[in-house]
Image (tube, rainbow, N blue to C red):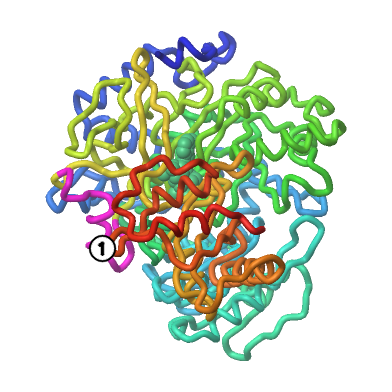
Amino acid sequence: MSQADSLQVFTPPADFVSQATISGMEAYRALCAEAEKDYAGFWARLAREHLSWKVPFTRVLDESNAPFFRWFDDGVLNVSYNCLDRNIEAGLGDKTAIIFESDDGSVSRISYRELLARVSRFANALKASGVRKGDRVVIYLPMSVEGVVAMQACARIGATHSVVFGGFSAQSLRDRINDAGAVFLITADGQCRGGKALPLKPIADEALAMGGCESIKKVVVWQRTGADCAMQAGRDVFWGDFVAGQSDVCEPEWVEAEHPLFLLYTSGSTGKPKGVQHSTGGYLLHAVLTMKWTFDLKPDDVFWCTADIGWVTGHTYIAYGPLACGGTQIVFEGVPTYPDAGRFWRMVQDHKASIFYTAPTAVRSLIKAAEATPTVHPRNYDLSSLRLLGSVGEPINPAAWMWFYENVGGSRCPIVDTFWQTETGGHMITPLPGVTPLVPGSCTLPFPGIQAAVVDETGTELDWGKGGILVVKRPWPAMIRTIWGDPERFKRSYYPDDFAGQLYLAGDGAMRDAQTGYFTITGRIDDVLNVSGHRMGTMEIESALVSHPLVAEAAVVGRPDDLTGEAICAFVVLKGVRPEGDAAKKVIKDLQDHVGKEIGPIAKPKDIRFGENLPKTRSGKIMRRLLRSLAKGEEVTQDTSTLENPAILDQLKRNVA
Ligand code: WT7
């Protein structure tokens, strides 16, 4: 059966279509046809029209060293110039670039001119301390204007930033600094979330003390909470002292289009997070195009992406995309539930947000909150400024989609369900709001120029209606360039030999609707979990668990969760006797805290179960599909004949917590 038969279809409202940048299915088809006919010519045209080049490119796509593709590689530009200077030159100097709302509700506005001055001052300070083009700078900051300033300042001088999410632990921070060989760390004394001040600098200090961070020459500390923090003489400097006396004019460092703008670490199916390396020109092009086409951004819009700058969404749709288009955006420090779960709706109302981009897990938690406390229901707020909604990070279930559509969007705003990844740089499969009839739960059709397909294990494209493996058939400008320091892993992970190295492997399963060809993402096909839109490798969590002195062996799987999409479920074999009752509860708590310390609170397993062993085949392979059934609470119906120790299943069925 077709999705369209079982679910309502929402055609784009006529008044949206009439003003949309890409208006109507014909316009979309024409773009796709243009790309089909002359792939390089299509992207070249867009790169010339939408970006400002210091030196125009003459080469478009270089496939000679595939899969290490190069785009526009003899062109020269600067991302910060494209985001700031060129808007000011176009007369937008006094336009508000950022409306910043802090955790406690105070609001400040910063114009393009002020933002450029702050970025330039910080960029000059970095240069004066010896940071050079190509040096890596790790940014470990809370959501703030300073975070955006730090990223833009790196871009301005050609330093490659690597932002580490403020919820990651000292160990995770240390590993990222070490892998990137970073020379600078930019952090804050602490962060304010939900009315609480939480430490950051002490975590950074712990990371730096672990060893392996010897490349770090300086630590810049933004004073956010005013908490006392230890400052190491010669190494640590407060933000204010760092920029003191610096000029607010800084000539951009003009870099080649392939120059690495940033690294961003993300989880894969093996233990070590990988440093996804992004380019300058191709990346920025996709950020701009998706802002204009997926979000239909117009000069009067107030754009709000609720992501954190620690994730790729916060890179493309906070730090770069909105600014490169001269937009006005909201940057929010706090959490959706403080002081109450009406915070998002009150902010939309107060700042007259017109485009609101968030994650399904946030929508689901706010549905729950609105059901429990009617005063925080969106109906109590004036949300009439909204004209477009967006969803990202995980599949949005049709019920949450409908609630979002009706209660937040007033049944008037299209929802763009944007499928993409850290590696893709920007949206890959997404509705265009003035084009695509929407089906709740489907990310619909590829962005113009993106050649997505569903294939079988041999790489053969499947008929619509059949589930398979999601791939991209041609390189695109914003794609990952390599894994920092590990090109072999890049090839293995994304261009595996199974597909003769010809197809980009997303790592997700997908299915195209039999009638419409719409894509639905069916979830990861590797050992990667998606908890509240946060990506985590099962092996990463397993290594954290086995690093605890009590643990002999651990296997981690995901199970469906109504609120977080997936929940982490760990099966653990302890070195001593298997604990029961309160003793078990205590060990569970210890192990959860331990994982929180090793990786970060987002990686804490929700369920932990103990067994004397794990279900294994005779050759010693852990049978994860059985664990997945157990985690779900299903009866194990799979074939267990290859299982060495079937009795173990009974032990693992019980959830003591
Ligand atoms: C994985 C990528 C995209 C930026 C934030 C997450 C899942 C993402 C969707 C969507 C279904 C989605 C996929 C993907 N995912 N967006 N709209 N529908 N699934 O980036 O941390 O790199 O995670 O998130 O599984 O592979 P990420």
Q: Quadrant of the N terminus?
A: top left
Look at 17% across and 38% down and name the residue there. 458
Dominant SS of magenta comes to helix
Q: Which residue is mark 1?
A: 619
> Could you tell me the amino acid type at mark 1?
Ser
x%, y% of residue 37?
19, 23
Left/right placement of residue 247 relative to residue 454 reads right
Residue 362 vs residue 199, the one in the foreground: 362
The image quarter containing residue 227 is bottom right
- Looking at the picture, how far across and down is residue 567, in whole percent? 56, 49
The residue sitting at 36% across, 32% down in the picture is 510
Q: Nearer the viewer, residue 80 or 335?
A: 335
User: Which residues fall within the magenta stretch?
Assistant: 482-499
Query: Residue 130's x, y, as percent?
Result: 46, 79
- Looking at the image, is 597 positioned above or below residue 34? below
Q: Quadrant of residue 463?
A: top left
Element under disc 1: loop
In this view of the protein, which residue sits in the foreground, 335 or 578?
A: 578
Q: Residue at x 54, y 67 (%)?
A: 599
463 on left or right of 528: left
